Amino acid sequence: MYKIEISERTLHFKQPAGTSRGVYITRHSYYLTLTSDEMPGIEGVGECATLPDLSCDAKPEYAVTLRQVCQMVEQMGRIPYDMIRAYPSITFGLETAFASFFDAAKKQGVSVSVPAGMENLANLFDSPFGQGEEGITINGLVWMGTYEEMLARLEEKLQAGFHCVKLKIGAIDFFKELDLIKRIRDVYTRDQVELRVDANGGFLPENAMSQLEALAKYDIHSIEQPIKQHQWSKMAQLCRETPLPIALDEELIGVNVRSMKQALLDTVRPQYIILKPSLHGGIYGCNEWIELANQRGIGSWITSALESNIGLHAIAHYAAKVYGPNVQMPQGLGTGQLFTDNIPMPLEIRGDQLFVVK
């Protein structure tokens, strides 16, 4: 029989993390430690992390719900996926706790019976990336700030060796942001530096197309969530007429049922979707999104959602399983250095790649 202990922790950002939705100073997470009386000395750890005002499961009663779900898992001995679709962060925390438990048991030569429906968790950490044999290419992230702050952060990322940089836009004056992008392109071609921008829904629908046209002049790889979510018809029109690829992110939050995922993708027809397991249904839910996107010729990549290194570590291994071996498309996994008090994990950035340290 499994037992799950819950703990919690607040992490602190080294510098304010600004988006068009607001600024993050701290990050609160819950941690699940999974053990079994039958296998003493073996444990798995997972992270449940919601983003206030964004996660569909970020509710006042979250701690109570988490305890109830964990008690249900203890009794059932498995993750009841269909019963907890509305709680993606809890789903992901449980998945990573079980995956790391299975991995710990394997390393100790202990045989574990993997419950039906959870087979994909048994080998999450078994990949060339997981063995430390190869890295995952990642993008550098430039948070919002003043023009001068963003320029300094950008130059820091380029000097560190990143060949793909993502800029958070939509909060300061758009023409200043455009000037920042122009300055990059004056020096670096698209072959030298891939530029992604993330508006976090910061554009108004009536202005969005002209802003996309202005951005398209600078060889932008893609723009994430140009307008606020839940405007399917307006987003669909943008995706049809856009001069640069659009990637959905926030739009996927709360769309937890397979038929609704199909409806969203068929209605909006984005060029890309961006998957965050803590927000988009855990590994189970993200696998569903990827399957449906692939069927429709829609591209995807995986990013963290400001989890601590516990969650980031699991997400990186998941990205390696989905897109590996030899992951070339930059993933959004460079967030482990954001906190002053992060939890140590065997992860290391070398140039523009994330490695597991063995």
Image: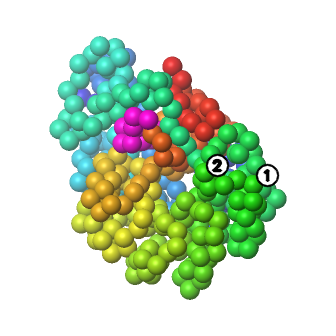
Q: Nearer the viewer, mark 2 or mark 1?
A: 2
Q: Is residue 324 magenta?
A: yes
Furthest toward the right, the residue is 148
Give the residue type that dot 2 points to.
Gln
Q: Which residues are magenta?
A: 315-326
Using a 10 Å C-alpha cutoff, classify the residue at mark 2 as few (fewer than 14 neighbours), some (14 to 19) or many (20 or more).
few
Viewer-side residue, 203 vs 32: 203
Dominant secondary structure (helix, strand or loop) of the stretch shown in magenta:
helix
Mark 1: amino acid: Ala
- Residue 225 percent coordinates (x, y): 51, 67
Residue 201, image quadrant: bottom right
Of the numbered discs in the image, which one, if any, rests on residue 192?
Answer: 2
- Badge number at residue 86: none
Secondary element type, mark 1: helix
Q: Residues within 10 Å of mark 1 (few under 14, many from 20)?
A: few
Distance (Cα) linking label 2 and label 1: 19 Å
As drawn, the residue found furthest toward the left would be: 116
Q: Is residue 73 visible?
A: yes
Residue at 39 percent across and 34 percent down: it is 325
Q: Which mark is residue 152?
A: 1
Q: Is residue 176 above or below residue 104?
A: below
Q: Is residue 30 visible?
A: no
- Residue at 48% from the left image edge and 42% from the top image edge: 328
Q: Quadrant of the N terminus?
A: top left
Q: Please name whichever residue, 29 or 172, is drawn nearer the observer in this view of the structure.
A: 172
Q: In x, y percent, where is residue 9?
A: 56, 41
Q: Position of residue 106 (x, y in %)?
A: 31, 19
